[in-house]
Amino acid sequence: MSPVSPLVASGLRKSYGSKEVVCGVDLTLQPGECFGLLGPNGAGKTTTLRLCLGLTGPDGGSIHVLGHEVPREGREARARIGVVPQFDNLDPDFTIRENLRVFGRYFDIPEATLQERIPALLEFAGLSSRADTRIQTLSGGMKRRLTLARALINDPELLFLDEPTTGLDPQARHVIWERLRNLLKQGKTLLLTTHFMEEAERLCSRIAIMDNGKIITGGDPRALIAQHVEPHVVEVYGEGAPDWAEAFGRRHAERCEITGETIFCYANDPAPLITDLDRRGDLRYLHRRANIEDVFLKLTGRDLRD
Amino acid sequence: MAAQHWSPPRLSLRFLHVWRRNLLVWRKLAIPSMLGNLADPLLYMFGLGYGLGRMLEDVGGLSYIAFLASGVICSSTMMSASFEAMYSAFSRMHMQKTWDAILNAPLTLDDVLLGEWVWAASKSFLSGSAVLIVAAVLGLVPSPLAIAVIPVIFLTGLAFAGLGLIMTALSPSYDFFMYYFTLCVTPMMLLCGVFFPLNELPAAAQILAQLLPLTHAVALARPLVNGTVPADWLLHIAVLAAYAAGSAYIALALTRRRLLQ
């Protein structure tokens, strides 16, 4: 395999008690790509990341990160990885600048190098003017940007981002996406977990969908959409929608899914559906292109995962 | 518990980063923190020392306040190490997730635990030493041999920091620490010779007291502060060192079980 892959995991297994949460996961990242690991809550995404960081030992399989065998050389691997965790764990006792400096020291980065890097990272995070404020006063979006900047303090080749935009408003989310694209341009490799399908489609060149500890499918997002679902989706809402689906929708769409009073019609040709809905005029509908979320829901089902 | 949790500690100098992080935070609040740490022991010393001391001829050949001073040096060290290793460390581990952040850097949980252990002992060392200095200023420390109390304070801090970290590793919430204070810390305050000599206790209680770490800290500190070499000093040091090393090792194993899932 060339060029050298920044992360190769094969046959990963991990159990807690009698429950196997990661069951035979294989992952190979290409240098400079953004790889998305998608899955419902409890699918095993975070555990997979913890295994790749060497924070817990696998019950089976092997992991190589940037040439280091993990978990045996987890310390060496982590020195070259940046991590944006799912929940902010910035240090509340420190200012923004101190957060970066103290975190940099954990990597044994010389003070002079830190002095050079910190202003650039503050700039990257858009927090230069607030460098000496305590982090309690920051908004959720600012905290995430600081967490991302903190993950870059060691100039990592590989970044792990565990649901980096969960809980952010749309503006803050777009800023994070823009920063991540920036990092891709610099040649960094990104491993992203998310359950925002839009995020995966925007950023990732390849994705894998994980459920119940297994990777159930993976590849280029557009190819996956083409492979698993029809290109058009008509969503129909309202009281009469289920009856309409039985009487008309099912005959003219390749697939219909019903959840409560919403119908999802998956069709190669949406024209007959739209014509009929326009003629009736009593049902609201939305016609859109199929996306990764449709693939995701088809493969992992619509049941709640708590 | 799985055998891997009991594997020998893997020590590295990176623990100093954790220690330094805590020092930086402490420095921001150093003065109120020191005053807070001193207020309690000094109240005991002056309140009981002068109040109760007037009614007592002498205790073990010393004025009561001089007797009390060496005990309070040890109990203050115990309190300070226990608070830091429980409430503060628990905040960093469980509430703020500071440890999680550190573990994403090239540090291990062993580094974190070692850093927290030495830090809690260092902070309690400051508390114990501050009481020693106040006692010296008051003329209650007649001999330069008292310098030898300084390492005793640090060792005492390590013993109680280790015990506190065991509680932290087991604790579901802050409330849990009250059990340890009520069942362990308060009895030690009363049974280990801080306020009155051990030989005033019933025989059974004296035997129990010999098993407790604070007894051995007081048995070292009191003669040293007053200018004599403690009897059986090697034994007392050995007991404190065993408590320190043993508790830190158990705390490490329990914390590995809790966090390295």
Image (tube, rainbow, N blue to C red):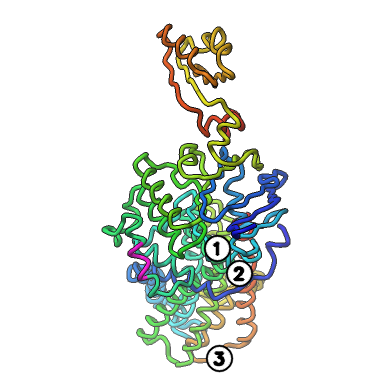
Expressed as whole percent of the image width and height from the top left, the position of residue B64 reads: 44, 80
Q: What element carries label 1?
A: helix
Residue A117 covered by magenta stretch: yes
Find disc 3 in the rendering and name its residue: B229
Q: In which quarter of the image is the C terminus of chain A?
A: top right
**Which chain is indicated by disc 2?**
B
Find disc 1 in the rendering and name its residue: A78
**Which chain is indicated by disc 3?**
B
Identify the amino acid type marked 1: Arg
Range covered by the magenta-colored residues: A115-120
Number of the front mark, 3 or 1: 1
Identify the amino acid type marked 2: Ala
Q: Which of the two discs, 2 and 3, labels the residue nearer the N terminus? A: 3
Q: Are marks 3 and 1 on the same chain?
A: no
Q: Which mark is residue B248?
A: 2
Q: Which residue is farthest front?
A: A2
For image coordinates 35% across by 71% down, the residue present is A115
Number of the front mark, 2 or 3: 2
Q: State how many labels appear.
A: 3
Measure how far apart labels 3 and 1 are at the Cα level: 50 Å
Expressed as whole percent of the image width and height from the top left, the position of residue A110 reads: 43, 75
Task: Please say if A93 is above or below B77.
Answer: above
For image coordinates 51% across by 74% down, the residue present is B194
